[in-house]
Amino acid sequence: MNVNAVILAAGKGTRMNSDVPKCAHIIIDKPMVEYVYDSLSGAGIKNVITVVGYKKEVIEKILAGKCQFAVQEQQLGTAHAVLMTEEHLRDEEGITLIAIGDMPLINKETYAGLVNSHIKNNVDLTVLTTDHPNPYGYGRIIRDEDGEITEIVEEKDCDTYQRRITEINASVYAVDNKKLFSTLRLIKDNNKQKEYYLTDIVKHFRAQGYKVHGYQISDHMQISGVNDQIQLTEMEEFLRQKIIRRHLSNGVTVHSPHTVVIGSDVKIENGVAVYPGSIIIKKSFIGKGSEIGPYAYIDNTLVNQGAKIYYSHVKNATIAANDIIGPHVNVAVEEK
């Protein structure tokens, strides 16, 4: 089945107190929105449209050559943002997956699982949900006595009972593309924020007799978003630790791991030792038996087996097997 994807990345992110668009802020070594695109691509989705708005040229540069773009000139809500993609998607068959550009922890397996659940259950709309120990700030999933999702209520519009609900909306959806845009036009801005909420798509789908399903994941951390600089820092630290644990599990030795940074796209073979103060980022590859550090900076570099790099800076280079680089060496090759 044909699967399209929309990434919502038009917002400024007022609480970031920054001139940089929210989704362009860097986590470790790449912008948030790039994590989202990479996970969608990893799930096998090729047709991606990113909705841009505030300083659109920044997001367009990050994802240049990877996807198409739709522009939301006025920030009128998430439903309005998706509606801006109609020109690109109105004639497409199959499913459209709607993702959020400031949620970089959702992995390719979750996106693929959402799509597969949608197809398997033969429904018109599937909502990604999770049970959260602290649901404050998230839209609540409202179910009827049969367990069917009837609507999503945003935190600001919740009554006292609804605020006690711990199943939350992840703001990610799989939807029948042919039914998407006609339903978006039914959504009104009659809420406290005077915005067109994408969450209202649930009640409008049900009102039309369409099938709505929930796909619940157990890892609530995946749906963490970033709204301010504190959350950005917390997100980066969480991801840094997660990446290091993955490499430790694969047989990499990391000394003083609290001082080490490894990018999400870095590949390290087992038997490698990484010493304190080292940073390994971008598309770097570290071959078996190599020693990195102390205080090595490795950027987009191929390090062959048995090499040793310490107290040095290496960028866009290829290091031969068993080579020794350091101390105080700067190797930088200009990208073509």
Image (cartoon, grey):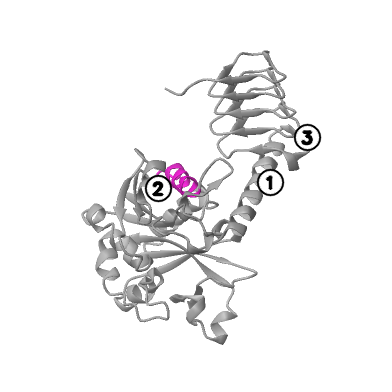
Q: Residues within 10 Å of mark 2 (few under 14, many from 20)?
A: many
Q: Quadrant of residue 303?
A: top right
Q: Residues within 10 Å of mark 1 (few under 14, many from 20)?
A: some
How far, Cα to Cα, is label 1 from label 3?
A: 13 Å
Q: Residues within 10 Å of mark 3 (few under 14, many from 20)?
A: some
Q: Amino acid at mark 3?
A: His
Q: Amino acid at mark 1?
A: Gln
Residue closer to the observer: 333 or 120:
333
Query: Closer to the camera: disc 2 or disc 3?
Result: 2
Any part of residue 25 in sight: yes
Secondary structure under tag 1 reads helix
Q: Amino acid at mark 2?
A: Ile
Q: Relative to residue 103, is residue 124 depicted above or below?
A: below
Magenta region, mostly helix, strand or loop? helix
Q: Relative to residue 181, is residue 187 depicted above or below?
A: below
Secondary structure under tag 2 reads helix
Contact between marks 1 and 3 (CB within 8 A): the answer is no
Residue closer to the observer: 247 or 210:
247
x and y, in percent, of residue 281 in the image: 59, 34
Query: Closer to the camera: disc 2 or disc 1?
Result: 2
**Extent of the magenta region:** 32-44
Magenta stretch holds residue 250: no
Secondary structure under tag 3 reads loop
Q: Relative to residue 176, is residue 168 depicted above or below?
A: below
Seen as rendered, the residue at the extreme bottom is 160
- The disc, 2 or 1, on the residue closer to the chain's N-terminal end is 2
Seen as rendered, the residue at the extreme right is 256
Residue under label 2, please give it. Answer: 59
Residue under label 1, please give it. Answer: 241
Residue under label 3, please give it. Answer: 255
Contact between marks 2 and 3 (CB within 8 A): the answer is no
Residue closer to the observer: 93 or 30:
30
